[in-house]
Image (cartoon, rainbow, N blue to C red):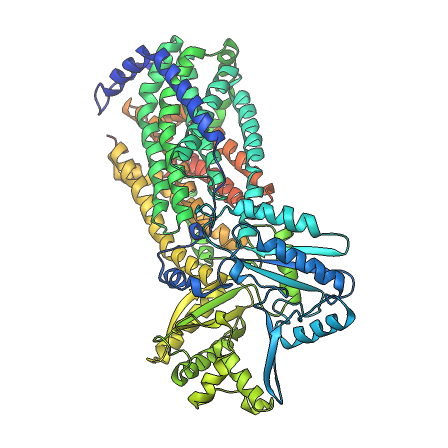
């Protein structure tokens, strides 16, 4: 009989696992029936799962900037969550009867879309878009669409004049007069149901009722805004099902190629798929849905399940090959691997749960979804899989193949086992130190936030980014808006000290790199004062006379101050929303407040899409190191609990840390910023990667306990565990590698990073771990054992 079977069935936890295994296998049929019934129930729950996304889930709602924005959101119409529909004509300009009739129809269509804040809707056809001018008789003005408009030549000429006087050129009318914008602010709650706004449905309505309905050979519709971006992400994320199918097929084929046994392949795929069904069903029971980011988690759960399944089926095949009956082989497999498997899965789950320290709801939900899936794997892979194997057994073809496989891999593992000897170990450690230096050097260039214009979650050639590029090219005001809220006492926003301070601040910010222009209540005041003085530009300034100020502000738009005149937004139009631009703006506001303190105005950041993103970047920058400390702290604690040795723990953790450092360097080199979409990859890579080291060192420890030398013990560990680790790492790398072809760029980025981390974690466990074990042995007469 193989020496592997002669190991005692008890260890530090006494008879617990043998006793538990006897109880489980006595109730085998009842347990498998229960698993089947629960799976059917969760499959039904999964079928009712819906996409779920909201504006507030994507932002750090407890950050002071966001708290300031939410407090004043009702007074910031059009400066928060808005959709912009651009209607472009390819023939002539917008001043034709046909175009204006079409723009009116689309405005009416958008007005009735569910989720649109109708009172704040802006278009050439809405009454809140007005023109104004100074004449000899005083100020005159009105709606841009002239009274009695009939589409005739005279009415169209009047419309052109009104548009030129409205100050909307470059804002809702293109600089080349080829298009006009309908600005549709959104409400966060559905006004009819009270439920959170369904962004996926809104995006679909925009496509069906606006783009598909009105776009033609002569008319192009461009749509931008958070809701449309989320809708496109969800549409693209539905392809995750296709990528899951591809990964499932690749995994199944490689599993069969590895084992040459359809029974083992079926058992592994079945139990890992059951885990995904349970995870999604539990998500539905918790009243949650899948957002664009957590849609990727089921595949990761499947990948972790396959990783553990390979270890279990490999051990089962090994014990069956040694002559045991399938039921006894399955029971022995449970006894041998339940402890390291449980510790590894616990490390995965708690590691994922550390993402909860990041105060962004979408990441916290991802942490909950991922850790729930890992908890399910403890049942489906550590309990259900041995039970299934005891029923399916193993084919004779697999047993015959194992003889050939063991012989073919003998030389490979013999050669790799030299990593635990002096010469190769020294070389490996030197290479590891060089890679550490390279990783630390390039990792310092890693950036927080977006590094590309447009929506970096999507590819540059996506329709959304093309629409966004059109807006940027044909309009003066950027879509990247940073709003600073200037607060004062009620009814004091028209007083000279406040207006003067805001004017000084606006001028200061206009000189900051990355700021295109600024707009506030002050600009309206200066324009009116200039108009009251025959348009003389010398009067384009803030008046110290309070009566003149009051008169100049009487005609200010309502969106430039709140109802009790205690807050006026200062709107900064930025070149882009890149991390460096946002950092520069935030630092400039803070520097101004520190250098020029005044009681007349309290400057509070930040609203607008750029302001929200700046707050998100700050939260991620603060949480990144804290999250890493938590995830490594948890993994280290669990390794210490399992192995009771600092040296062994170091052997497992150091390869993981090296992979994390190299991963950060890779992100810096590829221009991938740390943001909501990419931050979880770091924790996911660590959580999954620790499995390799735990399984390998568990096998190594058993052989060392039998009296083997380090190289011989590692060789024996490789024979029983190394193939499974190498296969798992390569298979998972290939599986997530297919994500690189996703139309969603953040999924492609995650696929690239996870492929890198899966492969390097596997390589570190097979090569660097034994070299570290040799180093620890050289510092002590023997490698530490329990």
- Residue 533 lies, with reference to residue 319, above or below; the image says below
Residue 713 in view (yes/no): yes
Residue at the farthest front position: 148
> Percent position (x, y) of residue 169?
64, 72
Q: Residue at x 52, y 21 (%)?
A: 408
Looking at the image, which residue is at 74% across and 73% down? 157
Looking at the image, residue 310 sits to the left or right of residue 138; the answer is left
Above/below status of 656 relative to 184? above
- Which is more toward the observer, 588 or 151? 151
Which x, y percent locates residue 271?
44, 23
Image x and y of residue 204, in percent: 59, 45
Vertical comparison of 621 with 280: above or below: below
The quadrant of the picture occupied by the C terminus is top left
User: Can residue 414 be seen at all in this image of the molecule?
Assistant: no
The quadrant of the image that shows the N terminus is: top left
- Front one among 614 and 554: 554
Left or right: where 599 falls relative to 681: left
Total residue callouts: 0
On screen, residue 735 versus residue 314, left or right, reads: right
Quadrant of residue 696 in the image? top left
- Foreground: 485 or 97? 97
What x and y, as percent, mark residue 288?
A: 42, 39
């Amino acid at each position: 009989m193989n020496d592997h079977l002669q190991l005692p069935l008890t260890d530090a936890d006494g008879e617990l696992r043998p006793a538990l295994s006897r109880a489980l296998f006595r109730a085998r049929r009842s347990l498998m029936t229960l698993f089947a019934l629960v799976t059917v129930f969760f499959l039904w729950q999964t079928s009712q799962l819906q996409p779920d996304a909201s504006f507030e889930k994507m932002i750090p709602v407890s950050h002071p900037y966001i708290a300031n924005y939410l407090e004043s959101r009702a007074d910031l119409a059009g400066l928060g969550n808005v959709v912009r529909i651009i209607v472009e004509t390819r023939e002539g300009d917008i001043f034709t009867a046909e175009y204006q009739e079409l723009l009116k129809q689309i405005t009416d269509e958008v007005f009735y879309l569910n989720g649109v804040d109708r009172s704040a809707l802006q278009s050439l056809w809405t009454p809140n878009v007005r023109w104004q001018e100074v004449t000899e008789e005083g100020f005159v003005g009105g709606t841009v669409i002239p009274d009695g408009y009939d589409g005739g030549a005279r009415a169209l000429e009047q419309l052109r004049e009104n548009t030129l006087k409205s100050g909307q050129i470059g804002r809702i009318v293109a600089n080349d007069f080829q298009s006009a914008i309908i600005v549709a602010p959104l409400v966060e709650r559905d006004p009819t149901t009270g439920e959170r706004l369904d962004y996926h449905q809104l995006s679909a309505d925009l496509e069906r009722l606006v783009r598909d309905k009105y776009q033609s050979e002569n008319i192009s519709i461009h749509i931008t805004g958070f809701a449309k971006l989320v809708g496109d992400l969800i549409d693209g994320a539905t392809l995750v099902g296709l990528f899951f199918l591809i990964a499932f097929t690749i995994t199944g084929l490689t599993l069969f190629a590895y084992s040459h046994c359809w029974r083992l392949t079926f058992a592994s795929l079945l139990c890992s798929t059951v885990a995904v069904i349970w995870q999604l069903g539990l998500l539905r029971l918790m009243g949650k849905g899948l957002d664009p980011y957590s849609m990727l988690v089921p595949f990761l759960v499947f990948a972790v399940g396959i990783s553990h399944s390979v270890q279990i089926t490999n051990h089962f095949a090994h014990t069956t090959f040694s002559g045991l009956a399938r039921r006894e082989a399955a029971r022995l497999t449970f006894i041998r691997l339940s402890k390291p498997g449980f510790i590894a899965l616990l490390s995965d789950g708690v590691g994922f749960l550390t993402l909860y320290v990041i105060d962004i709801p979408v990441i916290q939900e991802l942490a909950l979804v991922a850790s729930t899936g890992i908890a399910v794997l403890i049942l489906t892979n550590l309990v259900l899989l041995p039970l299934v194997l005891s029923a399916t057994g193993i084919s004779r073809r697999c047993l015959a193949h194992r003889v050939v496989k063991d012989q073919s891999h003998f030389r490979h593992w013999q050669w790799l086992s030299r990593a635990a000897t002096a010469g190769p170990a020294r070389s490996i450690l030197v290479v590891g130190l060089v890679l550490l230096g390279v990783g630390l050097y390039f990792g310092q260039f890693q950036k927080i936030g977006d590094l590309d214009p447009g929506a970096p979650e999507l590819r540059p050639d996506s329709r959304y980014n093309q629409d966004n590029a059109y807006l940027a090219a044909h309009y003066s005001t950027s879509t990247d808006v940073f709003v600073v809220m200037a607060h004062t006492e009620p009814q004091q926003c028209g007083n000279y000290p406040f207006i003067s301070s805001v004017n000084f601040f606006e001028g200061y910010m206009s000189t900051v790199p990355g700021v295109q222009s600024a707009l506030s209540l002050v600009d309206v005041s200066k324009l009116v004062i200039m108009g009251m003085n025959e348009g003389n530009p010398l009067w384009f300034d803030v008046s110290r006379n309070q009566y003149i100020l009051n008169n100049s502000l009487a005609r200010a738009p309502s969106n430039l101050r709140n109802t009790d005149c205690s807050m006026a937004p200062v709107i900064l139009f930025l070149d882009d929303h890149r991390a460096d631009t946002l950092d520069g703006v935030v630092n400039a506001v803070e520097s101004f407040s520190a250098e020029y303190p005044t009681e007349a105005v309290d400057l509070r950041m930040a609203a607008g899409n750029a302001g929200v993103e700046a707050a998100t970047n700050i939260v991620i920058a603060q949480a990144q190191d804290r999250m890493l400390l938590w995830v490594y702290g948890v993994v280290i604690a669990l390794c210490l609990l399992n192995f009771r040795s600092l040296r062994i723990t170091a052997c497992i953790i150091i390869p993981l840390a090296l992979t994390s450092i190299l991963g950060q360097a890779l992100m810096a080199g590829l221009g991938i910023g740390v943001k909501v979409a990419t931050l979880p990859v770091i924790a996911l890579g660590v959580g999954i990667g620790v499995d390799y080291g735990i399984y390998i060192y568990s096998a190594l420890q058993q052989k060392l306990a039998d009296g083997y030398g380090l190289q011989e013990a590692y060789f024996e560990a490789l024979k029983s565990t190394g193939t499974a680790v190498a296969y798992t790492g390569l298979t998972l790398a290939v599986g997530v590698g297919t994500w690189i072809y996703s139309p969603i760029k953040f999924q492609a980025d995650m696929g690239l990073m996870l492929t890198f981390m899966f492969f390097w974690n596997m390589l570190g466990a097979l090569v660097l771990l034994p070299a570290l074990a040799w180093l620890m042995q050289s510092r002590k007469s023997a490698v530490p054992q329990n």
